[in-house]
Amino acid sequence: MSWQGASWLTRPERELEEQPDRMLHALHVLPGQTVADVGAGVGYHAWRLAARVGPSGTAYATDIQEEMLGLLKENMARHNVHNVVPVLATADSTGLPDGAVDLALLVDVYHEAVDPQAFLRQLRRALKPAGRLVLVEFRAEDPTVPIQPEHKMTADQAIAELALGGFRLAERYEFLPWQHLLVFAPVP
């Protein structure tokens, strides 16, 4: 998504449509952890993650658009959040430190990857050995989800692609109104 459409990321109805707090509650993010909101956009999930990890934790917020990171920084200031580290990523690099991340959250991001397997290698490198990779993607199995087909994935598709990248499905939740919540662990 272009930074010029950033207002869609903070639309008032997003709370009802995507239930971000309920989604994050299911992930059991703990104080002191290091987390990453990959493809963070304006930081809609980053400030929520930052609150969960608390002042002793760190929340990285990555995006490939400098303009989005500018909006993210404004949002963090507005929410009085000080433990979010903005990271300018590229198509070739997440920009995340190796072996540092307990949980990497990708909300409606993975399907946008130009080279999904290279992207997964980068994410795997950033995760701690017991780290988790979380995909939240609009359900392609459900034609009533009002999102363009190119912005949806089936759970089977996501699970198969991540298996090729060295991840196994650890948890699966289907309580969100329109999205899958899939938690993956790296295969040793």
Image: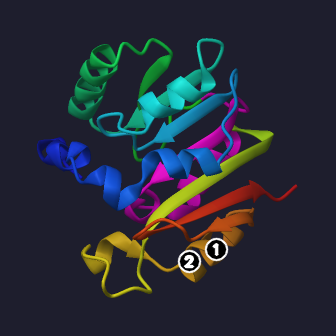
Q: Secondary structure at mark 2?
A: helix
Q: Residue 136's spot in the image, x, y percent?
A: 49, 60
Q: Is residue 186 left or right of residue 55?
A: right
In the figure, 22 relative to 79: above or below?
A: below
Q: Is residue 39 left or right of residue 136?
A: left
Relative depth, front residue between 120 and 73: 73
Task: Report the residue at 30% width, 84% height from top.
Answer: 144
Q: Quadrant of residue 127?
A: top right
Q: Residue 158's spot in the image, x, y percent?
A: 56, 72
In the rendering, which numbered label is found on residue 71?
none
Q: Marks 2/1: CA distance?
A: 6 Å
Task: Report the residue at 11% width, 43% height from top.
Answer: 4
In the rendering, which numbered label is found on residue 159?
1
Residue 126 visible? The answer is no
The residue type indicated by label 1 comes to: Ile
Relative depth, front residue between 125 and 38: 38
Q: Is residue 106 left or right of residue 69?
A: right
- Per the image, the residue denoted by label 2 is 155
Asked if labels 1 and 2 touch by Cβ distance under 8 angstroms, the answer is yes
